[in-house]
Image (spheres, grey):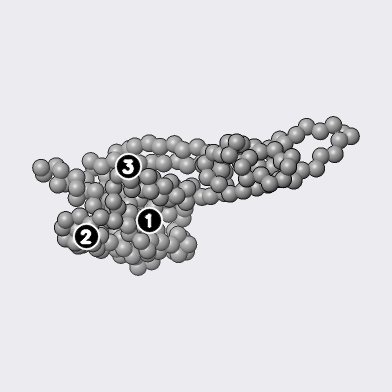
Amino acid sequence: MLNPDLKIATLEPSVHLGLELQVNLGRGYVPSEVNEKYIDVVGTIPMDAIFTPVRKVKYAIEPTRVGQRSDYDKLVLEIWTDGTIRPEDALGEAGKIAKDHFSIFVNFDESEAGGEEISDEIEERVRQILNMPVEELELSVRSFNCLKNANIRTIGDLTKKTEEEITKTRNFGKKSLQEIKTKLAEWNLTLGMSDYSALKNHIKLNMKKEESDES
């Protein structure tokens, strides 16, 4: 049982209760009327089922700075789950579901005119960002010196390091780790990255915004 504190029944001292439970996988909320269709044993009582592992979500939109620009917005999400899934995984699954729903209106595989040129420019911007010195993150002196001692010179070098690897650096504490993670997040980057899709999507949106501003 996921919730050992869930009250199933109240028994008198002289009563013995035996139960056989049927547990299924599912998604979202399923009423007992639907579950009744999957019952094979006579006498089984169908129940409403709640499969969602997400208990609560809180969001906020805050102003943020990327590099030298400060006219961007940042979406901050707080996700509470029941422990069967990590919040970041729940967010990823939600993104996939949203994409599937919106695919009715948009062909995500459709290549746009001039797509190759745009892709090349995005790749070039990614390379430029990853080749920037870590000074661009404007870290505290302590955090910067820790990276310097670890021979981490560029933002790209930093994103290739995992949390475990970077915390092994001499004099590197939790405060420095949190600062670095926060600074990287401002650039849509994280530690231990092998996929820069989030950064590419962010750059693509910025390019469209720049085109819109110019027009």
Which numbered marker is on residue 190?
1
Quick check: 1 above or below 147? Answer: above
The amino acid pointed to by label 3 is: Lys
Q: In terms of secondary structure, where does tag 1 sit? A: loop
Which of the image's four quarters has the C terminus? top left
Question: 158 above or below 4?
Answer: below
**Label 2 neighbour load within 10 Å: few <14, some 14-19, many 20+:** few
Between tags 2 and 3, which lies in front? 2
Q: Which residue is mark 3?
A: 74
Q: Position of residue 123 (x, y in %)?
A: 23, 62
Residue under the image location 33 percent in, 48 percent down: 103
Front residue of 124/91: it is 91
What's the residue at 16%, 56% (across, down)?
A: 113
| Amino acid at the residue labelled 2 | Ser
Task: Specify which label sits upstream in the sequence, 1 or 2.
Answer: 2
Per the image, the residue denoted by label 2 is 119
Q: Position of residue 82 (x, y in %)?
A: 57, 43
